[in-house]
Image (spheres, helix red, strand yellow):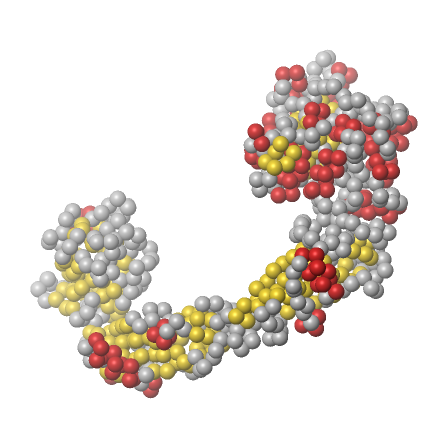
Amino acid sequence: MNFIMKNSIKHFLLPLVCGIAFISCEKQTTPEPVQIQRPELQSPIVRDDVYYARLRAYKKTDHKLAFGWFGSWTAIGASEQSRLRSAPDSMDIISMWSQWHSLSREQIEDKAFVQQVLGTKVVFCISAKDVPEEFKVDGQITDESLKDYARAWGKDSIDKYQYDGIDIDFETAADHLGPLNTTPGLFKKFCEELSQYIGPKSGTGRLFLIDGNIDALDQGIAELCNYGVSQAYGCSSATMGYTSLTSRTASAERVGWKADQLIFTENFESYWKSGGRPHTTLSGEQMMSLQGMADFAVNGTSCGFGAYHMEYEYGHSDMPYKYMRQAIQYANPAPHGDYSKNLVTLNEAGEYAFEIPVFPSGMSDGIRFSLTGSLTGVPTADAEIPLVVDNSLVTAYNNYYYTEYKTLDPALISFSGPLHFVAGSQDSETPVIVGITDVTTLGDEEYLVPVRVDFSKHSGFSANTDKEVCYLKLKTKQQVCVLSLPGMEQVTEISVMQGEDGMVIEKKGYTLQLQASIGVPVDSKFSIVADPALVDSYNKQHGTKYTPMSANDVTLPDELLLPKNSQATTPVEIKAVDYEKLTSDGSMVVLKVDLGGNADFNTIGDKDIVKFVVFKKMEGNIEENATRVPGTVIADMSGWTYDAPGAEGLVSSQMFDGAIAMNQSGWYITNGSVTATVDMVNVHTLAGFRIRPMYGLGYYKVLRLYDVKTSEDGQHWVSQSGDSFVSLALSGDDWQYVKFYKPVSCRFVRMTYRCDKESALNGYVGCNEFNAIASN
């Protein structure tokens, strides 16, 4: 059993692997055939019916495709290089780059073995340059020519020679041009005819591939195909490695290819001895380009990789097709184990470290971890295979890595169930949740929990020894949750307005919400106390005369609730019990959160959980921080005037023109104050009004307005803001609103702006638009 476990993608490949590459279509010097042993005799794998069945099943799974063009195919002679069966067993698609028709008995048998026993798809390659003369009409390519040509290749030839599809070589180099690929729309028509017999739209299961300059095709062709094969030859670090593949992907997508249709290939007519050119991957790793293309399939966007003239690679004396095998193994790691049984891969096999927060009371969330499995073979019946903690592996692990991990009592570890495999599916149905909730017995040591599959009652299954054990490394960490109240000791003032009759118009309150530094694993409750003695201390320290309020004077909740895993308590609103007793001098309540001696919670200081709230009764008719005024904006502003003596840039008519572009500044001041008066010509009944600050709400917000008054005749003025200022909301729709509690009948509206840090933002204050809002 291996103790170096790495997290890798789920795959249950079979032992041998293969690859593909792509190159220019010009013939170069063929390597001298090397007489070596047959590949199957070099491998320790027993190739029996079970092996081949699993191989075929693997090729039906979701994995990265290995593709190759195969030339010099004769299936005769002393060297296996001339035979398709010499290629790696795990090749997915082989395209015949040599004579594919008029097959000999040896070729028929060779191809049938590769297709039927190994499950490899074999296609033949044709040119997109021209249509054979026998299909032309008076030397011309007609619609009928294309139909007959498409049927001859896509149906008749495939049926006769039992191929799995067609690969069309579409190239734009001068020596590859002809009427079929240069006449506008002609090649697309041919592809549309072919798509009746091959490709995803045909329903036949036969493959339709196009290779070469796939980014030069007409829109609408890619959707007819299964795969586009890009000849990314010489894709080295000098050509930016993976960025070349990324660029090719983008070019192909512009004509309709999907990234997961693409297969990138290297030229093994030139680079078979080295496995390609030096290549830089997405992660910056250096490797040869065929493996780099496999890396792009795994960590990038493509569906596969391959090589042009893959058969050249048979010439390696140490292992035929060694670079293709390496690429396949890189993209689709093969399991290892007893191949007489169905091998189980623990997909999350590897090492995972957890630091478990534990509170002084022993409270902890513990850990929850998901495990899934996959099989090399397709099960014929449902199977439930349990997981177990195997502490015998801890000693072996410690000896191997010179560590000192402790074992954990298996009774503390729970599994939500076994790995459940449904008949016909190689993937476990639902994840198994590994849980550790009781950590009270854990000390300061580090623990190792080896989880593996238990085969004791399943003789037909065995472990993929490359992905067999999941090691959970556990260490506890002492944790305390720190609580605080926003604003801490700052005084929050609650102004409640009274009408002309002295009655409170709106009974507003203070919203209390306790903040937590971290979430805790259980619901937690705290009480709130009101301490009048702290009011006396505050008055002495600050020279104020606030009336102390006790717990009986405010609506204190029974508790503050901090929900499980939340970082804030449920908000509660605290109001005065009797608003009519409030005065303009203010009444103060000092609220303090009582932790009740709970050691799981703490504060940086007592002041963090103390809040000073002042309730004041104010005379006025304006709602604080209004974000809307219900009513109708008065549209007819003919003759209205806006006067603001001392303001810079004021043009009265522009204050009502509806122009509120960002570059309209309106009037402004940079210090002092300005009183603005609006004359609306006639008396209106207003629900309120709205102003647009200079350059909009994102720049120079108005924080406060002072001395807001209205008048019907310009001589007798009624205060709407009382003796206090009016706080304006700082967020909304680029307007700031002044809302009257009771509608006001008036012709004139007057307000004072101040340019100071309490009243204006960013050192400027001003306005570029005024709207009056009539009461409905």
**Quadrant of res 297:** top right
Residue at 49% over, 75% down: 600
* Position of 702 relative to 12 (above/below): below
Q: Position of residue 120 (x, y in %)?
A: 79, 37
Can residue 281 be seen? yes
Q: Residue furthest top?
A: 138
Q: Residue furthest bottom?
A: 552
Camera-side residue: 621 or 360?
A: 360
Camera-side residue: 727 or 269?
A: 269
Q: Position of residue 203 (x, y in %)?
A: 75, 39
Quadrant where the N terminus lies? Answer: bottom right
Left or right? Give the position of 686 relative to 92: left
Residue at 24% over, 60% down: 703
Q: Position of residue 341 (x, y in %)?
A: 84, 54
Residue at 27% over, 68% down: 623
Residue at 31% over, 79% down: 590
**For the image shown, how many numbered marks are present on the structure?**
0
Quadrant where the C terminus lies? Answer: bottom left
Q: Position of residue 241 (x, y in %)?
A: 59, 33
Camera-side residue: 363 or 35?
A: 35
Q: Residue furthest left?
A: 715
Can residue 249 be seen? no
**Quadrant of res 243:** top right
Camera-side residue: 71 or 204?
A: 71
Left or right? Give the position of 719 relative to 596: left
* Position of 343 relative to 714 (above/below): above
**Quadrant of res 730:** bottom left
Left or right? Give the position of 137 relative to 719: right
* Position of 210 relative to 579 (above/below): above
